[in-house]
Image: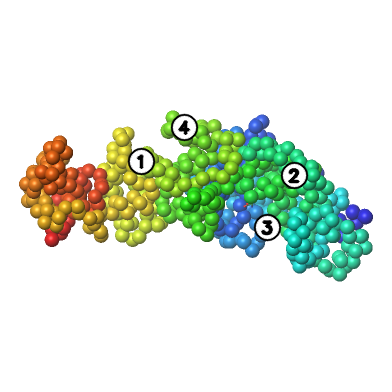
Amino acid sequence: MDYKKLANRLFPEEYKPLSYYEEIYPPRALEKGAEVTRLAPSPTGFIHLGNLFVAVANERIAHRSGGVLYLRIEDTDLKRKVDGAVEAVIEAMSYFDIHFDEGAEIEAANEYAPYYQRQRAELYHAFAKSLVEKGRAYPCFCAEEELTALREKQTAEKKITGYYGVYAKCRNLTEEEIYQNLDAGKPYVLRLKSLGNPENKLKFRDEIKGEITVTENDQDVVILKSDGIPTYHFAHAIDDHFMRTTLVLRGEEWLSSLPVHIELFDALGFVRPRYGHNCSLMKQDGETRRKLSKRKDPELSLGFYRQEGYHPRAVKVYILTLLNSDFEDWYRKFPDKPFEEFPFKASKMSKSGTLFDLDKLNDVAKNEFARLSAEEAYDFLCGWAQEFADEEQKTYFADRKYMLRVLNLCMGTAGKKRRKDFATAKEAVNLLSYFFSRPVSYEPYRVTQEDRNAILRDFLAGYSAADDAQLWFEKVKAVAEKEGFASDMKAYKACPENFKGSVSDVAEVLRIAVTGKANTPDLWSIMQILGKKETAKRISEQIS
Ligand code: GLU
């Protein structure tokens, strides 16, 4: 077979010699050990938690080693392209403090551009042509129905499905048949002519999974589709080579294609990058663990964390905790050090499914929220509210000073032991609503209506906003005593049957009347913040 002739027929265009591309995309001048990693999303508009996990790992590995993190857009599948998706990726990543050094829509030297696969057709075609010239790629004219029939036959015969070996019909077409098909204008795809034998097993070092066994590829995979657009396999090999990626860290769903990629790099004469395959994110669902699903689990979408108002740092801390199991200890020891100092390593990443647990994230988020100063909390909550809160909630932020007093009370004094009430901005804004408007609902009172009325009346009779916390409490105790509740906890505990309840029940009545809730920060302080008029009004409205 005259491969050169075939190559010229399939690719009539004269391309530059392949060495040209090696020259214009030379190996990067980086320090030894510097890693070049990338994020390579398809612009589908849906960025998910899995992308963020891989992005955090890629970012840490690149930047810890003095290397480069770049953004490549895998837009070969036009049907899935959504306008604004690239900006959305950049924006979503920057929210979590992940910044690209180069790539699509990034202002930088961008020496390895273009970063959109659609704009790299020349490269793909030049190399596809070279594979045809070497007899390592051939046109396949099989129609969709033929391939479906083949798959069904293989399934029925319990054979591995695919286009390989004896099933790879077009691999054995004669020169004459090929030209006949081409002359007839039959559509075709370009396939790799695999030389592999699945009986051969190779040892392979995955940066995350460690040593694994890989079966040699024998699939004649498609490298260019009938419209000349490359498949992921082919584009990956060309791009990661010419963008000089040193470490391909990607989702585990690509592990099964690794043998194809190994063969492609060899066929193209490229040195392979190293690979790390990140395990899938799992969720505990009753007794079983399953993969997080787009349909069932809103938390898979990154938009979820924005809408709920998780502080980006909290999400990052939790992701780092899951990515490198020693991060938690390190962070406990050095809570104030920048994350950059943590010795992040691909080899410490989990080898099998990572359990993503929203309850754990909430615990982390409460801790992280408690680390904010009142001012930082104000800015964060206010930013969230402008985007996601209702009109009434937005007004909470009009009086900054007032909100700061509220936050100082509800979070506790900085430096001291802080309250940990809020996991998200949404939760915080909802929980703080009683400082801005009358409660819309009340948790149940645990005393009789008669006692409740008496307690509220007695309290109002003696209430003065000028009382300090101590005097205020003396007065609450006096109310307790008057109404048959123990003012002294010790006495109450010794003989509870002698009392209707204790002073804490009395305080709870006041608390619910003022805030709607049985659990709040210090009630005296709340009354101080609300002021005498509002406090008295709320209490008297609860007397029935
Ligand atoms: N476009 C692929 C994806 O979104 C990229 C995989 C990779 O990182 O190589 O899954």
Residue 497 pos. (x, y %):
13, 44
Residue 246 marker = none
Badge number at residue 215? 2
Give left or right: position of 368 versus 246.
left
* Dot 1 amino acid type: Ala
Q: Quickly name the residue at label 4.
A: 329
Q: Where is residue 333 in the image (x, y as percent from the top left)?
A: 44, 30
Residue nearest the observer in this picture, 8 or 134: 134
Q: Please tell me whether mark 4 sits on a helix, a strand or a loop.
A: helix
Which residue is at a point 66% across and 34% down the rendered structure image? 30
Q: Mark 1 points at which residue?
A: 370
Q: Residue at x 33, y 52 (%)?
A: 429
Q: Are the residues tagged 1 and 4 within 8 Å (C-beta)?
A: no
Give the number of marks: 4
- Distance, label 1 to label 2, CA atoms, is 51 Å
Above or below 62: residue 198: below
